[in-house]
Image (cartoon, rainbow, N blue to C red):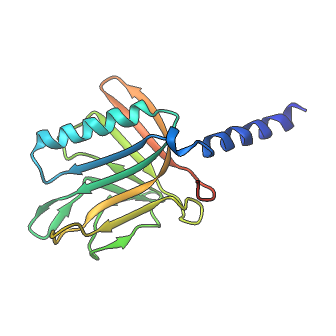
Amino acid sequence: MTGLRTPISLALLMLALVATPAAARPAIVANIDLSGPQQVVADQAAALADALSAADGKIIDLNLTVTPTVDGDVAEYGVTVQSGKDRAPLRCDSSWERLETPTAFAVGFNGAYNHLLLEILNADPRMAPMLTVACEYRGGSPTPVFHLRGRYVVSVIAIPTAWDIQLRPVTGPPLP
């Protein structure tokens, strides 16, 4: 009987997490402008770290925008894309596009803020319909921004001088 209760208990826990009312879900909006002064980037990253660490174990609605630094024709987003075991810097070379195939993104802050290790797991849009990851144009800038919107469960591990935070996409049908 114990063997049957465990999967049922796990299913009920997942249902409770997914059915969290919108009013109880934190909405975290963050704009990290890597083209700005280092202190501004550090303040933006620290605010994101504080908001995410306070949401440990909760479902959040995240709206994250990263504006790159630009050196000549090369835009640096501070985002590493992982596909399987391969890792590479994010490139928005084809202007705007949806990014559906990577398995994860690691977000850094170009040395301005080293107290947050942030990994954002990705999922197939059919399994995580609230998730959109894209290179998008904003305003009059010729360089696209990295924009990520979705519903995630926050997992935080405190380490001596930083936070190690992993965001795991909520999968299943769209939530109310």
Query: In the rendered view of the protein, which quadrant contains the N terminus?
Result: top right
Of residue 28 and residue 131, the one placed in the foreground of this image is 28
| Residue at the bottom extreme of this rendering | 94
On screen, 61 above or below 58?
A: below
> Extreme front residue here?
23
- Left or right of 28: which side holds 72? left
Is 69 placed above or below 91 here?
above
- Residue found at x 52% / y 36%: 58
| Relative to 5, 98 lies left or right | left
x and y percentages locating residue 15 in the rendered image = 68, 44
Residue 10 percent location from the top left of the image: 72, 38
The answer to whether residue 146 is left or right of residue 6 is left
Task: Tell which of 148 and 88 is nearer to you.
Answer: 148
Q: Nearer the viewer, residue 2 or 145?
A: 145
The image shows residue 125 at horizontal and vertical percentages of 53, 65
Residue at point 68%, 37% (across, down): 13
Q: Quadrant of the C terminus?
A: bottom right
For the point 52% across and 38% down, the residue is 24
Side of 2 relative to 169 (left or right): right
Q: How many marks?
A: 0
> Which quadrant of the figure has residue 163?
top left
Residue furthest to the top = 160
Horizontal and vertical percent position of residue 54? 41, 30
